């Protein structure tokens, strides 16, 4: 069923023109504004933003990009979803293919990754999921216009959120966090309201409540998409149901209004009527729930059209007070605006006004906008000064931000989005943790008056809706860091002891503990060398690496990509990388040749690539470092091409850069090349010092390197004989003299 834009505008204008402000009657429970003494609190426009179309999409307030500053999200009939900063400046907008009417955005971390998404419906039949940066993550096509507001909850308890939203195709859809349909339920009618969720029967599973626009049915649907019951009334409804334990009996009631028979209904969790309150006008507004007078029981706040009355009922359905004079179509928001310990009620009227009344129904202030107000006023401390701001949109394309005057502080409550929270229960959020009081009490069990139930400096909303941590445990992951410290100080994950999954727990990375290193707990590879921090600290199994210990493990510095400062990253050295070599990451010169591993692995100063694991790459007897010194080619054993290796030439003082193969440095008749080939010393004519030159030995076929192996030398033998003959003659002379002397001795 589709309504044209023109018909809607006509209906709205007709409603406004037909509104006749009524005078206050003499009833004792009605408030006579004329008798009020003016309060000190007032309001003024802080800023406004003009869109290019009417705004009937109630804004959502959240720090969507997690930068510590609040953003405002809303849709417009100019087809756009807008994101503004807290000063009213546009951060981004996303354009759909249809105008956005009535559907109010919900903001949540759908995937549990710490990033918030925005969900909203459009007249182009799509449900959109937009990232915190304004980019579409996914969309889902229903069969018709979407004017229902999305409800977001972990419906099946799997740790990810589901989206519940209705369409003019008569279906309630349940979508996964990725935008896939999980189920749908045919309510056989148009749905304009937001689904409300709660554990109605206290069985540990959630139920969903939806109203029908025409067929007068309220449906209760299970988390599996099956009908549990339905209640048929005498009129359809545009009033989103509220959920509350009105009578404090431990079971929940459902409260909603009907548009034609002017009745506010209260039914129990089984769909049986407990009471009803009959008004004199259509009830289009959704009821809001709070303990307005702090007496321990809840009040119900709603407004009517035609009769033009705003009502406050007690938990039994009896009127406490009313405020008359204005036609009301949209819900009220509730908070302690001036921190006096008493709640104020802020509601819009079709006569372009925002009204503030106190807990007893007395008017505090009014504000007149530029056009019809078609949204709920949302309440949030946008600038962090402790005072709430009021944000709402008009059909005149204007988003207003109002600031309070005469107020030094506001109370702890907020009303940050349509129906008070993404669960759409219509309850106040007393501690401003983005979870309404009912949901805290009945689903999560947290303290609705304390934003941080476990006092770990991480509020319950962040713990439950974003980080999925335990709101009752200060250290959800047991890593000795409190959840608040992990999120706000260290930016680590409070449910993972090892946030970056690098094998080192967060506190060990944050504090120089057993390993002695301070590493980044959010980056598995602090030094970006391709090795996990845990692997560097705990050991990399690389038994063939020169640095491996007895068990085959190599240890490197996780804060330094090049542990030995040789110009090669640790991974390149530990694991055969682009250079093809496994080198020692803790030694800049693995082969001790006086060239760094990097210098050898790349065409460095010498323009050569050598083997960093072999000190003499070309096996010429000259280390690569010495080749660099001598300017020879470390990859060619004979740089000058004279067929003598560089190492041999350098050893004997020859020039390895000059072809000196024919030279004869020792003048022994052998060329340098011949000496190289025979292994003789090119600087000494007689290498083995046997008296015969190397050339003669080679010519004679003896070994010039063995002094005991040499050819027969006649001249030498002549010399030997001459020396020997002289010695014998001398000996004979000595013998003759000795004989003569002996004979003489005998004669005497």
Image: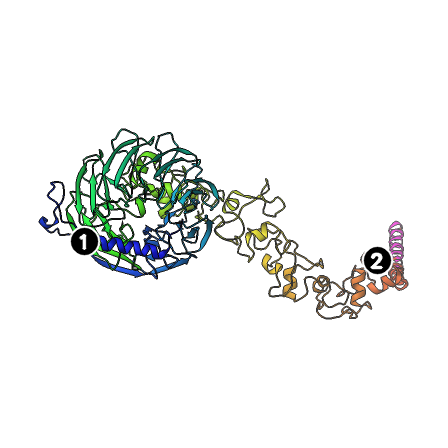
SS for tag 2?
loop
Q: Nearer the viewer, residue 278 or 723?
A: 278
- Determine which quarter of the picture holds residue 303: top left
First reached walking from the N terminus: tag 1 or tag 2: 1
Q: Which residues fall within the magenta stretch?
A: 728-746
Is residue 358 in view? no
Marking on residue 703: 2
Magenta residue check for 726: no
The residue carrying mark 1 is: 366
Residue that appears at 20% across and 36% down: 314
Residue that appears at 27% across and 28% down: 249
Q: Nearer the viewer, residue 743 or 403?
A: 403
How far from the left and from the top, in percent, is residue 342?
18, 43
Magenta residue check for 745: yes
How far from the left and from the top, in percent, is residue 419?
31, 44
SS for tag 1?
strand
Marking on residue 586: none
Q: CA distance from mark 1 to mark 2?
A: 121 Å
């Amino acid at each position: 069923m589709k309504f044209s834009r023109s018909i809607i505008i006509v209906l709205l204008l007709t409603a406004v023109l037909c509104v006749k402000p009524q005078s206050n009657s003499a009833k004792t429970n009605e408030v006579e504004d004329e008798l009020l003494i003016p309060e000190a609190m007032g309001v003024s426009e802080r800023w406004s933003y003009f869109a290019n179309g009417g705004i009937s999409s109630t804004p959502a307030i959240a720090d969507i990009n997690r930068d510590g500053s609040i953003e405002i999200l809303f849709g417009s009939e100019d087809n756009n979803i807008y994101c503004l900063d807290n000063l009213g400046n546009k951060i981004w907008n996303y354009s759909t293919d249809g105008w956005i009417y009535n559907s109010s955005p919900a903001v949540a971390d759908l995937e549990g990754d710490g990033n918030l998404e925005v969900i909203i419906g459009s007249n182009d039949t799509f449900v959109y999921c937009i990232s915190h940066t304004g980019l579409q993550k996914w969309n889902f096509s229903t069969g018709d216009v979407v004017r229902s507001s999305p409800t977001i909850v972990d419906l099946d308890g799997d740790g990810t959120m589901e989206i519940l939203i209705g369409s003019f195709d008569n279906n309630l859809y349940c979508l996964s966090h990725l935008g896939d349909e999980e189920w749908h339920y045919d309510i056989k009618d148009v749905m304009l309201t937001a689904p409300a969720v709660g554990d109605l029967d206290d069985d540990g599973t959630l139920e969903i409540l939806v109203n029908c626009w025409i067929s007068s049915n309220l449906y209760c649907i299970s988390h599996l998409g099956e009908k549990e019951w339905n209640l048929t009334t005498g009129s359809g409804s545009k009033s989103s149901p509220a959920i509350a334990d009105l009578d404090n009996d431990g079971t929940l009631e459902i409260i909603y209004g009907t548009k034609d028979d002017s009745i506010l209904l209260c039914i129990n969790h089984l769909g049986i009527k407990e009471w009803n309150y009959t008004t004199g006008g259509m009830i289009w507004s959704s009821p809001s729930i709070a303990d307005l007078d702090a007496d321990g029981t809840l009040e119900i706040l709603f407004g009517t059209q035609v009769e033009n009355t705003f009502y406050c009922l007690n938990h039994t359905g009896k009127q406490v007070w009313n405020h008359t004079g204005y036609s009301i179509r949209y819900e009220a928001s509730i908070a302690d605006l001036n921190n006096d310990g008493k709640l104020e009620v802020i509601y819009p009227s079709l006569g372009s006004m925002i009204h503030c009344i106190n807990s007893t129904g007395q008017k505090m202030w009014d504000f007149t906008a530029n056009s019809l107000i078609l949204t709920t006023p949302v309440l949030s401390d946008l600038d962090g000064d402790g005072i709430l701001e009021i944000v709402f949109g008009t059909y005149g394309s204007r988003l207003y931000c109002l600031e309070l005057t005469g107020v030094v502080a506001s109370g702890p409550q907020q009303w940050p989005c349509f129906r008070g929270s993404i669960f759409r229960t219509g309850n106040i959020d007393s501690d401003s943790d983005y979870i309404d009081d009912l949901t805290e009490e009945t689903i999560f069990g947290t303290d609705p008056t304390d934003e941080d139930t476990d006092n770990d400096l991480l509020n319950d909303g962040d713990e439950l809706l974003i980080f999925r941590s335990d709101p009752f445990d200060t250290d959800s992951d047991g890593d000795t860091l409190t959840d608040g410290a992990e999120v706000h100080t260290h930016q680590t994950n409070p449910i993972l002891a090892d946030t970056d999954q690098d094998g080192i727990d967060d506190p060990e990375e944050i504090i120089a503990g057993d390993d002695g290193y301070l590493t980044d707990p959010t980056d598995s590879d602090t030094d970006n060398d391709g090795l996990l921090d845990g692997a560097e600290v705990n050991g990399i199994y690389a038994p063939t690496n020169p640095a491996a210990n007895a068990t085959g493990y190599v240890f490197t510095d996780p804060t330094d990509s090049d542990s030995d400062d040789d110009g090669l990253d640790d991974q390149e050295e530990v694991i055969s990388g682009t250079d093809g070599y496994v080198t020692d990451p803790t030694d800049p010169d693995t082969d001790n040749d006086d060239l760094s591993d990097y210098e050898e692995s790349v065409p460095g100063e010498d323009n050569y690539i050598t083997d960093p694991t072999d000190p003499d790459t070309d096996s010429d007897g000259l280390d690569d470092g010495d080749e660099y010194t001598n300017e020879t080619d470390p990859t060619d054993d004979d740089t000058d091409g004279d067929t003598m290796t560089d190492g041999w030439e350098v050893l004997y003082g020859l020039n390895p850069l000059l072809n000196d193969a024919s030279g004869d440095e020792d003048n022994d008749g052998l060329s340098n090349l011949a000496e190289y080939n025979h292994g003789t010393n090119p600087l000494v004519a007689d290498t083995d010092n046997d008296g015969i030159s190397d050339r003669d030995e080679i010519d004679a076929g003896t070994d010039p390197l063995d002094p005991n192996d040499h050819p027969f030398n006649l001249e030498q033998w002549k010399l030997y004989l001459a020396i020997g003959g002289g010695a014998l003659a001398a000996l004979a002379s000595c013998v003759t003299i000795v004989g003569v002397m002996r004979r003489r001795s005998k004669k005497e």
